[in-house]
Amino acid sequence: MPSHTTVLNWTKKQGISQFMNFEFYNHQKWVLIADESIQFGNKKLLLVLAVPEYRCSQSKPLSFKDLTPLVLKVSASWKSDAIAAEIKQNIDLNQIAYCISDTGSNLTRSFKLLNCKYISDVNHKFSLIIQSVYEKNKSLDEYTKALSLLRAQKSMSRIARIVPPNQRIMNRFMNLTPLFEWGIKMIHLLDNNELHDEEKAVLSFLEPLRDFINETYKILICLQEMKKVLKNKGFDDKSAKEAMNIFSKINTNSVNSLNVKKLIDEYFDDLSTTSKGKTVCCSSDIIESCFSKQKEIGKGNKTVGISDLCLCIAAMMGQNNTEKTRQAMETISIKKVKEWKRKNVCKTLFAEKIELNKIRERNYYRKQ
């Protein structure tokens, strides 16, 4: 009977079968989506996906079936020249239509080194827009400090029901919406006299910030709706107009909203330069989904680090069918799996710990 090890080996074989040779990419143009994982142990995983350009021109989100893994490799760090070298080794640069990634400097520099067109992921771009407009905003600083103090003082008190959600330290400008949703909800409860006197007293800091909270909440909600349009339909003249019509519903000429609109216009101008009348993909959500799968696989034992189980990511991709899977099982040997691991996966954190223990034990017995 097949054991769990057998099934894992089958999965790894399926993952390796998804990687294509250099010549495979020469028959059409491709869009590359690149990102690196968060730190797993002391290593990072670089993932570069290839998607046919014609598929990115269709007005619907990408799925795992549309993806071909181009690079799946582990390293202690990924610098721009190393990323560029990995891409160059696997695909003819003339076949790359454009690249999509977050705003990480190492990724953007690598595309520049390769002389490839670059599109910033809409999630991260909108986050940067919010950050540039609100980072030094005194009202936001006052609001977030008050929420932090309220959480610290009242989380275990009788009025814990009004405690605001936690603030994320990393990428906090991507996650402001829950804080302002809470503010809008509390203001509504105060206006309708639905809170106790103690709760009203604790929330008294909201009144001077009422206009700021209402305006910022509207901007954040509009940006979410705009992102939904761009993720589902891609970017072209029609979707850009639809997205800007959403923002125009704010009906405010405040400094903050005007600054946000100006930066969105600049982003859309950059996208228009790349699209040249075509529909282009401006979302890297699909690669975030891949990393979510990786986190789910590795959460059982985080001390292991990144192993060749990352091939599970590749195994999910492509148009798999019975015949293709049969060929993968018959033609890819365990020796080939081990060779792939040697080339693409460093020693895991778990292996490094075992090696360290062996050295300690050897030294101990020598002294004895």
Image (cartoon, rainbow, N blue to C red):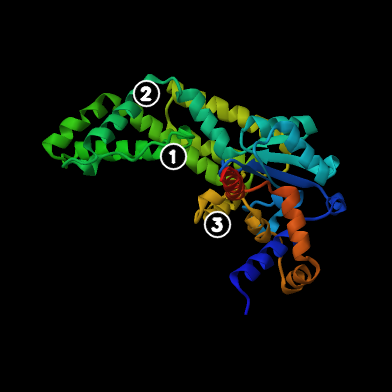
Name the residue at 74% across, 58% down: 338
For the question of whether residue 282 can be seen, the reply is: no
Kindly report which numbered mark, 1 or 2, lies closer to the viewer in this rendering.
2
Of the two numbered discs 1 and 3 on the same chain, state the one appearing first in sequence.
Answer: 1
Q: Which residue is mark 3?
A: 297
Q: Which residue in the structure is indicated by mark 1?
A: 221
- Secondary element at image label 3: helix
Density class for disc 1 (Cα within 10 Å; few <14, some 14-19, many ≥20) is some
> How many residues crowd around disc 3 within 10 Å: few (fewer than 14), some, or many (20 or more)?
some
In the picture, which quadrant includes the N terminus? bottom right
Query: Could you say where residue 268 lies in the image, as x and y percent from the top left?
Result: 63, 33
| Coordinates of residue 165 in the picture (x, y in percent) | 33, 40
Q: Is residue 352 left or right of residue 146?
A: right
Label 2 to label 3, Cα distance in Å? 38 Å
- The mark that comes first in sequence, 2 or 3, is 2
* Residue occupying image coordinates x 57% and y 42%: 367
Marker disc for residue 212: none
Using the image as rendered, state which of residue 269 and residue 49 is in the foreground.
49
Can you say whether 346 is above or below 78 in the image?
below
Residue that label 2 marks: 141
Q: Residue at position x 76%, y 69% from top?
A: 324
Kindly give the residue lying farthest to the bottom in the view shown.
1
Q: Amino acid at mark 1?
A: Ile
